[in-house]
Image (cartoon, rainbow, N blue to C red):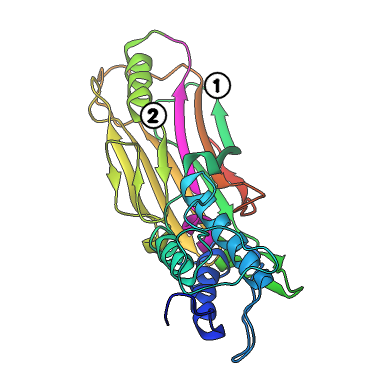
Amino acid sequence: MAVGDTITAARYNIIRARINAVLGLGAGDEGYGQAVESTTVATGATVTAQHMSNLFSDINKCRVHQTGSAVTQIAEPSVGDTIEDSNTTTKEGYVQYEDISITAQAARLTAAASQLGLESGTSSVTNTNWSSDINHVFTVTFPGYSVTNGDGSVTAISATDHMRVFFNAGGTINLSGSIGSGSSPINNDWRNLMTAVGTVVFGRSSTSNGSTGSSYGYSNLPGSYVTIFNKTASAYSANDYLIEARKSGNVLTFRVTFNEDKGGNPNFDEPVTATTTSTAQLKRPNNSNSVDVPAPSFNTTNGL
């Protein structure tokens, strides 16, 4: 096409399909599970300013989610505007829309921090002294949901797709632990360990506290328990904080273990006397104006 030519339905549909795969249901590592405003245009039909306006809305939602800011590389057409092959002045041309759609597709697994909200999940607390391993086991269940698109059609997001789009859109499960007051050597060592652990983030393709972790995440988690994080204490080096996880259908199961394996005094197994807490939270894509994935449910099945 030459500069000044109008956009064809076929060219418009290519851009629309690319953005639909990112913002809509998608498949694999594409898809945020959101309603889409844009629709396909029949071959030979005219691409109107309204078609382009709806497409602009979908692209903008993707870029707000990915960057935290509204898109500036393209402009929203008004009724009466001619949609040309390229127009760098109006920013309404096919080339401008194609370029930003390719950018959005390439950045599909990127989420701006401002687009994710930290929310409560579940926790377990024990005030009982302990001198052997204690566990916190909990599940994260994705029930599925549905969205209504701009043309009135409804897209059902299955339970397993709900899990997939949650992590595609930057959702995470965040795990942490804490040791309360108590100045004995074993209490201090466990407190120092949990401070060093900080927050462990389970994401789409990895798990990390920012300095150590594993390559296990949602996308490659097997059906049986695997270790996704482990950190050893300092003074009592036989003790460690262990997180294991597994995936079955639409359910993730996490097992957090405070491993109390120290040798210690052979005549007295020094107990941890401080209040011990295991906490799970989630970071969820929660901007109702761009990408908003419903939260899964948390359930503790075994407390500390």
Image position of 52 (left or right of 260): right
Residue at x 55%, y 51% (from the top left corner): 139
Name the spot of residue 58 as percent of width and height, x first: 59, 62
Type of amino acid at the residue the image marks with label 1 = Asn
Name the spot of residue 302 as percent of width and height, x first: 55, 43
User: Is any part of residue 270 visible from this angle?
Assistant: no
Type of amino acid at the residue the image marks with label 2 = Gly
Residues 79 and 181: in front is 79
Name the spot of residue 36 as percent of width and height, x first: 64, 67
Reading the image, the residue beneath label 2 is: 198
User: Is any part of residue 105 visible from this angle?
Assistant: yes
> Does 75 sit above or below residue 191?
below
> Does 181 sit above or below residue 141?
above
Reading the image, the residue beneath label 1 is: 127
Q: Indicate yes or no whether the magenta region holds residue 177.
A: yes
Residue at x 46%, y 24% (from the top left corner): 178
On-image quarter of the N terminus? bottom left
Residue at x 49%, y 75% (from the top left corner): 4
Secondary structure beneath disc 1? Answer: loop
Instruction: Check the image and name the residue furthest to the front.
Output: 4
Total marks placed:
2
Residues 250 and 179: in front is 250
> Does 29 sit above or below residue 263?
below
Instruction: Give the number of the disc on residue 292.
Output: none
Q: Indicate yes or no whether the magenta region holds residue 235.
A: no
Quadrant assignment, res 42: bottom right
Instruction: Check the image and name the residue furthest to the right.
Output: 152
Q: Which region shows up in magenta?
A: 164-182
Image position of 227 (left or right of 292): left
Secondary structure beneath disc 2? Answer: loop
> Does 132 sit above or below residue 78?
above
